[in-house]
Amino acid sequence: MSQMLDKQQTQLKLDQLNEALSSGTFMQVRRMLNSLSAPNVAALLESSPPKNRRVIWQLIDKEQQGEVLTWLNEEIQSQFLKTMDADQLAEITDELDDDDIADILQNLPDTVIEEVLSSMSELDRLRVEQMLSYDEDTAGGLMNTDTITIHPRVTLDVVLRYLRMHKELPPTTDCVFVVNNDDQLVGLLPIAKILTTDPAVSVREVMVTDVQSIPAEMPANEVANLFERYDWITAPVVDPNGKLLGRITVDDVIDVIIDEADHSLMSMAGLTEEEDVFAPTLKVVPLRAVWLGVNLITAFMASWVVGQFEGTIQKVVALAVLMPIVAGMGGVAGTQTLTIVIRGLALGQITRHNSRWLLGREIMVGLINGFAWAVVVGTVSTYWFSDIKLGFVIAGAMVINMLVAALAGALLPLLMKRMKIDPALAGGVILTTFTDCMGFFAFLGLATWFYL
């Protein structure tokens, strides 16, 4: 209930701020802006047209600009980064965590990155450089280096005194990591154990040694799957020698999950997950034109198939009326299978060991649904056009296309995954083309055989 009230109050503030911005009362806007949290200011920027964004950004306090940047999507973040020189960037990112700085720097040219890094202390620079050495979509790119480490030989009393020396613990700290003299991870010690165990006991006696660490090169989506499976709050990241590099926290994983969901949704339309809702017209047009061109080519392919049976259509006009039914049913059936398989691949549930079973299941589903709906469509078509041959033609085409759709929907993402192509990006277009062409070919081919 309190979360709902907070959300309503936040939305009310955002509405008031938009009204003040429209009326030109910039002093009021500045006060309201700097009373909001960084995520809410970022949300306001993302939901504002470009002209208003520039005004809002100038009104944000310098001390808050760095944190706001970390909450913006990459497209809008890069728009503001282009307006800053290295000194300005170093100033506003000075208080940020190392992983947030690394995320921001990845969107900049190498020359600017070098300038920003040169302005940091040696320790901070080494930490950021280490994170920049990993791809942003890997565990190494996700991790942050704000870890607390201890040695197994010390007592819990020493650990407590060591923790009290810190002004504050890193956010989302549920444990401290136990390392040997070579900084190799040997276990972890939950905070709860420190608070509830005899202080005279050594760390070695109570630490958890059955720890699943995350290799720095592990893809981000696999990291997210592990967090979901084991309900982790934090997890250690190690190099190939088992040396502790940093940790990944659940809030970083939530970002990955949201990005994956956005990617899947936007890819179906040929767009990126960083697409700016309020991007300028001239920037949006070419991005969408490419995908429209691809779809136009596939439409011509389907039209070519239909054109091969022009004589049949002229003799049996009812075929033109019924063609979309066969193609449409195949498209929907194929999309259902495609979506299930892409989701299974994303979650790591489908492997080469179980893909054959899944393919067999989808074939059976396609056949059963094909026969069931063939009876329905065939009966309706026979009654509608008073032509039993037409009913058999569309029924046969329905079975063929539903079977082909099931096969294509299951095999396409598996083949594309093997070819290192994102199934979410191109799978839908290829599937639609395939089911349309096959549906038209089966329907018109059977009609030619029956009527000519």
Image (cartoon, rainbow, N blue to C red):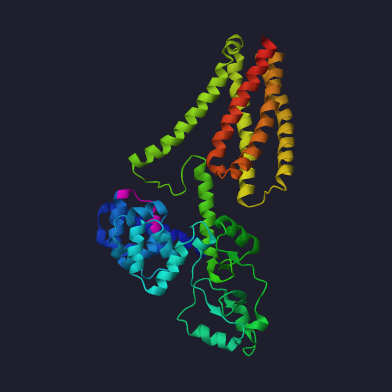
Over which residues does the magenta segment extend? 42-50
For the stretch drawn in magenta, the main secondary structure is helix
Query: Of all residues shown, which one is farthest toward the bottom?
Result: 200
Q: Which of 344 and 30 is in front in this view?
A: 344
Task: Report whether residue 383 is seen.
Answer: no
Does 44 lie within the magenta span? yes
Please tell me which residue is depicted at 67% across the width and 51% down the height of the picture: 349
**Residue 167: x and y, percent?**
45, 81
Task: Report whether residue 125 is seen.
Answer: yes
Please tell me which residue is depicted at 25% across the width and 59% down the height of the picture: 26
Please tell me which residue is depicted at 53% across the width and 58% down the height of the picture: 138
In terms of image quadrants, where is residue 112? bottom left
Please tell me which residue is depicted at 61% across the width and 67% down the height of the picture: 213
**Residue 297: x and y, percent?**
49, 28
Q: Which of 46 and 32 is in front in this view?
A: 46
**Residue 411: x and y, percent?**
65, 38
Q: Is residue 75 above or below residue 310?
A: below
